Image (spheres, coloured by chain):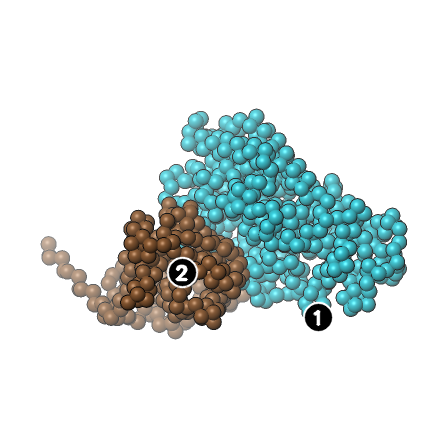
Chain colours: A cyan, B brown
Amino acid sequence: MSKLDIDFGLVAECRASASQIAGQVSEEIAGKTTVSVERTITRLLGVDGANELEAPLPNVLVDHVRDHGELGRGIAYWIGNALLADPDATPQTIAEAVDRGELDLCALARAGDDAIGMRAMRECEQRIECMSADMRERRELRDRLGEHPPPLRYVLTATGNVYEDVVHGLAVAQAGGDIVAVIRSTAQSLLDYVPFGPTTEGYGGTFATQANFAIMREALDEWSAKHGRYVRLSSFCSGLCMPEIAAMGAIEGFDNMVNDALYGILYRDINPVRGLIDQRVSRMINGYFGVVINTGEDNYLRTADAIEAAPSVTASQFINRQLALDSGVPDAQIALGDAYEIDTPVANSLLLEWAQAQLTRELFPDCPVKYMPPTRHMDGNLYRTHATDSLFNLVTIATGQGIQTIGVPTEGIFTPHVHDRVIGLENVNYVFNAARDLGEEIEFKPGGIIQTRAQEVLAGAHALLAQIAENGLFAALGDGVFGDVPRQIDEGRGTEGIVEVDDGYLNPVTELMRGATSHA
Amino acid sequence: MPEPSTRKPIDLSKVKPYADHLGDGIVQMSFTLPVPYGLAARKAAQELAAKMGFEHPEVVHYQELTDGYTYFVMFGEATQTVDYSTLSDEGFDVEYMGEDEIEAFANRRIGRPIVVVGAATGTDTHSVGIDAMLNLKGFHGHHGLEGYKAFQTHNLGSQVPNSVLVSRAIDLDADAILVSQTVTQQNLHIANLTELVEIVEAEGRRKQLILTCGGPRVSNELAKELGFDAGFSKGTYPHHVASFIVRELAARIDRTDG
């Protein structure tokens, strides 16, 4: 039942448009892979580590084949062939031999395509079955220890030093946080490799490395076991290494991942085709291992006006969801993004926010939704920010959002300090408890401000989706429809990492995961 | 009823914080110590505040954050004073012009489009500041410089290396550079802003280019110390930046002509 009296015929048409748009994206990215997708395959086959020059071995391996102009067959083809050539070899020993210059994958005698395909698939199945078993065990642990009821409180840490992040993460857990997300160093999104090893220096965040992932995971698992409540861990599948981070997160047992189809394109100027190929594989991996993804529509409201741009947020939610479904992520794992970003002097801003938040819930009842706090208009007046966060928390609980990124009073001043995050959580805990069942008690006045606003936003999104379906997503990106940021199909970072695939292209990961989930 | 006694005049040569009564010196502070929660932690916080020069330091709230970390909210009475009477609004006593005044001023005194190149530099991914100043949409209903006839703007976005920003400014024969810095952890912004000035000087362009920077922890004083012409903090609107640039450019043109 709709509290907003929205027209579900219109909603069905929005879904149809989104489906058409996602179909066009699939056509555009078909027949292409990227260097990061190929590196992801090596990681899932067990390749890890870095050489003396700090070049990660997945890069060494993929660049080696690429330099021969042979990446169009897929890295799995060359690894499969090398495995057949040497029964004692593993993908890791192959990568090490290539790095030492002792092995040229493209110079080996070639086995038959079928034999190579089967060998690569066997390797892939074994590795992925191990990871799936770990993930099953983790889900059992989560069920056994239990979690808070939703909305789950999602809290960031961003010190730059993974060992400090552990202190912050534990403080956040103690104050009732449900999901700890270590923000990546701002520099990382444009690196076309994943740094190796634990890191103690970074700005605006901590490098996402597999070692850092493992350190944080261990600390939170220990806390969870000791205190009898499971705390989730999240990172960011974003930038030029979206799919690799999905693989690393799966290996280290991450529960959630930020994973937006368009964020890197819009805000890191990543080439649209590169970004959409990478998101497809990245999300496929998240979906397969039962990881909940968070999309990033909230970001549009940091560069565009929150009132005017509301229909573009809703339209993007439809598109992001459809792209996730097409990558094999089920609704229950798609936390669509939304944010409380209307400027504070606007009269009835609470009502407008309430309308938008309720609309998102009603449009996507099976998706958890990740609701983001006010940041854009927050300034050095931290008491005002704290007050604004209280209203944000009220809307979150009353509209039943699945995940909430908590607001922090020092938002917009500096990377918040450990006690700021705890104070933010205390506000959340108070409001969630005080208004626990408010949503059940509320109905909206027919034709009132909230219903009218929600209907207007939906109508705007409907028109926008119809227009995008007609002209295509790439044209919409070129016109700056999302976040007021225009991006062209043939420009942007990482374009050189797109590879046209040959007829014999081999990708056992996609073959294995397409249309399947390990826990289904 | 007795006559209410008038309050003592404020001695501006000896100013201290004001909370309830003139001269009480009360300061509120909060911080975390890396020590376990307990009475010894409370005592440590009080001792620390006393060493910082506060009299009657009082812990009004303290709590454990996690094992080995305790958070405090405290009050104390400042014993130090400052001599306000000798200080002035150094540097930024510019009277800001409105959008129309800026257009008229630029038209009269400069008479050609003023080229401004802006970016969030270094590894900083935050474009919110530079977008607010340069893009047409601006901020809080104030147009960015793109919306002025007087300016020709080039917003290079975020994560722009300082060297790229400077070479673009040279190619475009820019009058002014506007840099935004949002990430300030471990004073990253200072190193980054310093590098920009060094590059501009190495290119021999310091005299031609007006250098401005902005961000939540950038002040005009800091900017000048680092070799910029002006710095803008939180609460800055595009017309503040525009006022500074048109006045500074007009002054430079006058100096050259004179």
Please tell me which residue is depicted at 59% across the width and 52% down the height of the picture.
A492
The x and y percentages for residue A27 are 68, 39
The N terminus of chain A: image quadrant: top right
Q: Mark 1 points at which residue?
A: A52
Looking at this view, is A331 or B62 the one in front? A331
Separation of marks 2 and 1 at Cα, in angstroms: 46 Å
The x and y percentages for residue A249 are 67, 54
Please tell me which residue is depicted at 45% across the width and 52% down the height of the picture.
B131
Q: Which chain carries label 2?
A: B
Camera sees residue A108: yes
Q: Is disc 1 on the same chain as disc 2?
A: no
Q: Which amino acid does label 1 sit on?
A: Glu
- Secondary structure beneath disc 2? loop
| Left/right of residue A208 with respect to residue A442 in the rendered view | right
Q: Mark 1 lies on which chain?
A: A
The x and y percentages for residue A407 are 48, 50
Q: Which amino acid does label 2 sit on?
A: Asp
Q: In this view, does A251 lie above or below A163?
A: above
Callout 1: 10 Å neighbours few (<14), some, many (20+)? Answer: few
Can you tell which quarter of the image residue A297 is in? top right
The C terminus of chain A: image quadrant: top right
Q: Mark 2 points at which residue?
A: B175
